[in-house]
Amino acid sequence: MKAIGLNFVRKLLSRGCYTITRAEASKALDRQGSALDKILQRLKRSGWLLSLGDSFFVIVDPLHQGIGSIPPAWFLDAWAQFKALEYYVGGVSAAEIHGAAHQRPQVFQIVVNRSVRPFRIPSVNIMFLYKKRMSSIMWENKKVPTGFFRVSTPEVTAYDLLALRKACPSIDRIATIYVELGEMIRADALARLFALNCEMAILQRAGWLLDQTGWSKVTGKLAEKLKAHRMDWTLLQPGLDALGRRNKKWRIIENTDVQPDI
């Protein structure tokens, strides 16, 4: 009887399946209520299952049982589909995936389109960042052993680092990321951010920061888009005094010094 659950998850893993819902387990095992709970609890205690809420479970293969979870990118898409949630990996986590984090992030940042209950997994600090309006052109798919997951494009990553305040509170660190991220940014895609209802002040800061970190060759088309509309003078660092040089190209008041750590 005790082997029923173990045989079940091993069979799923043999098919490359790393997630299961409570409803799917109930149907496959022909168990309900407390009988099903006993099997699921036994699998969790033995390290084969990790629960994300009451009804969604990650199957942890023997290779990853020592750290308690498979990488979140492996189960993220299945979890988001179960929650009927739009998402992408963003912020400093997206920067790392694009090869521009400079140092390994301490968190795994996921951008979602509505509030969700946080979950915890061993060895990884999950942070949810909220963005109400999301579009499929904001992300690209990355392949993992379980399928694919979404990650923000380099251009959206650059925008989100400034727009989503919790993503990266330090403008110096954002500049450090831009030094490497700029290599992946395409001028046309950067300019298209204007059509995604992105905040103009954030686009001004992003353009200024890309120029300052050596990537002025990709900012020309964005500058043209912004100049065709009225740009207000914008503080480089909101919340500080409006004192500093004025950059006419981006209409940025340089009210703080920016020092990339690279």
Image (cartoon, rainbow, N blue to C red):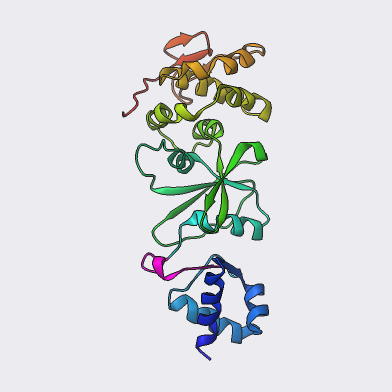
> Which quadrant would residue 20 be assigned to in this image?
bottom right
236 up-or-down from 91: above or below: above
Q: 236 or 88, which lies in front?
A: 88
In the rendered image, which quarter contains the C terminus?
Answer: top left
Where does the image place residue 216, in percent across and percent down from the top left? 47, 16
In the picture as drawn, the residue positioned furthest to the bottom comes out as: 1
Where does the image place residue 46, in percent across and percent down from the top left? 43, 78
Q: 56 or 152, which lies in front?
A: 152
Q: 105 or 19, which lies in front?
A: 19
Q: Residue at image x 53%, y 10%?
A: 249
In the picture as drawn, the residue positioned furthest to the front comes out as: 14
The stretch of residues the image draws in magenta is 55-68
Could one spot residue 60 in this view of the protein? yes
Where does the image place residue 102, in percent across and percent down from the top left? 36, 36
Q: Residue at image x 40%, y 27%?
A: 179
In the picture as drawn, the residue positioned furthest to the left comes out as: 262
Q: Residue at image x 54%, y 79%?
A: 40
Is 114 part of what is drawn in magenta? no
66 up-or-down from 89: above or below: below
19 up-or-down from 160: above or below: below
